[in-house]
Amino acid sequence: MEGASLNFSSAKLYVKHRNCEEEILKVLEETGHEGRLIDKKRNPLVDGNQSFWYKDRKATMTFVSGVFTFIGLILYFISSNQGISTPFFALGMATGGYYIAKSSFYALKSFSLDMNFLMLIAAIGAAILGEWSEGAAVVFLFSVGNTLQAYTMDKTRRSISQLMELAPNEATLKTTMGEITVPVEELSIGDIVIIKPGEKVPVDGIVMKGRSFVNQASITGESIPIEKSKGEEVFAATLNEKGLLEVKVEKLAEDTTLSKIMTMVEEAQAQKAPSQQFVDRFARYYTPIVVMIAIVIATILPLLLNISFEASIKKALILLVISCPCALVISTPVSIVSAIGNASKQGVLIKGGTYLEEMGQIKAIAFDKTGTLTVGKPVVVDIDTIKKDFEEDPLKIAATMEMGSEHPIGRSVVERAKLEGVNLDLILDDFEAITGKGIKAEVDGNLYYLGNPQLFNEYGIGLKSIEGKVQTYRQEGKTVVILGNEKEVITIFTITDEIRSMSKATIKALKKVGIEKTIMLTGDHDKTAAAVGNAVGITEYKSELLPQDKLSAIEELVQKHKKVAMVGDGINDTPALAAASVGIAMGVAGTDAALETADIALMGDDLNKLTYVVTLSRRALKIITQNIVFSIAIKVLFMILTFIGRTNLWMAIFADTGASIIVILNGMRLLKTKSK
């Protein structure tokens, strides 16, 4: 074996090896654990066909232990011969303690003292002292705690794996011989699949024929169906509601957006948050120290104080039980897993516990304008021809220059030309893009400039004659794009981008949940930025920013507010997203680059999800803190009670198991957090 890594949250062990799979399973069994091989292509986190109680042998052994312990207790209280109950207590210890002893053996074998070892020593000590009832209670209740912990984690994993189960296992493939049903794993890129009304989309693809409304809630979290027609993208696990669609396969089953989401959720849950790293470091030293203290109490305390060895050993055993860090160790992971799992079902991907905790401490949020606060699909509104005697069609020249552009403004010019039926047959030469300002190129042998006023100022082309017009357009919130040649301005194009309907409500809601500052960062002119800012409720903005300027702005905000989030499109704003405490990308469903760029990804275009993320993160941070403080406090309290002689093994195990159940249930409350 060359290496191995365990993902506790998904219950998966990833092994890099040169041996056959059967040998890996054999080695795994030798460590005291059970496992099964999973299919790399479609691998739900848990086996959805069997219930937890049916497949978990530890749960069965716990039940049997409870039966023997209960019978022993009945006989203990009703029989004058209390020795008759001892065999039942012994059987209760043997059945409930089998897996505890097994885990302890392998823990010792690897030179690590864990919680199972503490419980085993306590149970054996109780038996040696003749306290069979307490020994059985220790084993049974600890086993119950472990079973409940496993059950709740299994339930949490199921809530995530249900996403993968949404995708159909089969697809209707269109062939020259007709329609045939095939497993989705057998589909190839370029195949045509037929999706009938009421069926789920099997893979990611492009609609080739048909029109329908598709519910994309499983991917984007949006409950309102989206109309899909020829040329538009559909995702695996989304529901085709009405029409018949023919879809060309664009991604294999294992590469779909849904599969990527599942992989990212697993990886996110495997990443340890700062609070979890603290707990792990604490537990690493805590357990050996507790064992040493227990040994001192059992062996040295009777020599120093006037107490019997039996009493001191009993105190040591109680200390071992109450000191077991079960609740502390599980306190953070169950909260992180629950929060990230909840978010994924709401169409929000959080890359790990670190970002969940960081988001819970955010004080300021910076927004990109285009595609974030606005729809991101600018349209040409005005075509104001300044040079009236210009012979060529200005729109035709501008669209020719922008034909290869990927910038939203450039695309809007081309779309306007297509809308008016302009034939783009001019010859384009010597094209050059000037970052943040515009472009210059030769069209049919003549040199033209197309861009913002800064471009013309840079090349010394006078704008005095149009300053008033430019000012007026900007005050209206419009972006000004100028077409001109080496001597003069030819035409002014004004472009506007529709503001998202939920932008204003989102900014208002963020302030209500405690975000101290919202700021807009944009490359647009000051007047345009002011108009958009006023419309959405952002009073502070920075305009005419190049990518490096946005980066500097984020760095300044971080210095001032410490914890800052940046919301952008995940690609164009990459430097700023990387510099922020948390980078958040919007509307990235199906966009691999954006998924990889951001720390948090909003799969749909719903800006309201941002308030949900802030609320969820702060609630998670609060619950994690509650769990850690409670876990430590209950230990300290019962340790004090142990030293003053106010506890016994029954109370100790109840306290330990009870604390574990409380922190688990508290963490699982995050599964119920909803987005509005």
Image (spheres, rainbow, N blue to C red):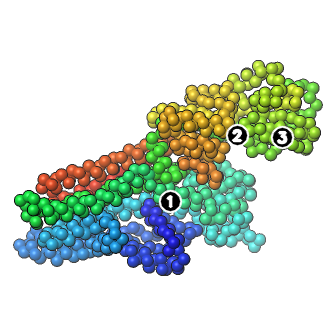
- The numbered mark, 3 or 2, whose residue comes first in the sequence reads 2
Identify the secondary structure beneath mark 3: helix
Separation of residues labelled 3 and 1 (CA atoms): 46 Å
Identify the secondary structure beneath mark 1: helix
Can you say whether 67 is above or below 644 in the image? below
Identify the secondary structure beneath mark 2: loop
What is the x, y in percent for residue 366? 56, 36
The amino acid type of the residue labelled 3 equals: Met
Marks 1 & 2, CB-CB < 8 Å contact: no
Residue at the location (67% across, 27% down)?
Answer: 526
Q: Left or right of 111: which side holds 179? A: right
What is the x, y in percent for residue 394? 87, 33
Q: Which residue is mark 3?
A: 401
The amino acid type of the residue labelled 2 equals: Lys
Q: Which residue is mark 1?
A: 266
Q: Which residue is mark 2?
A: 377
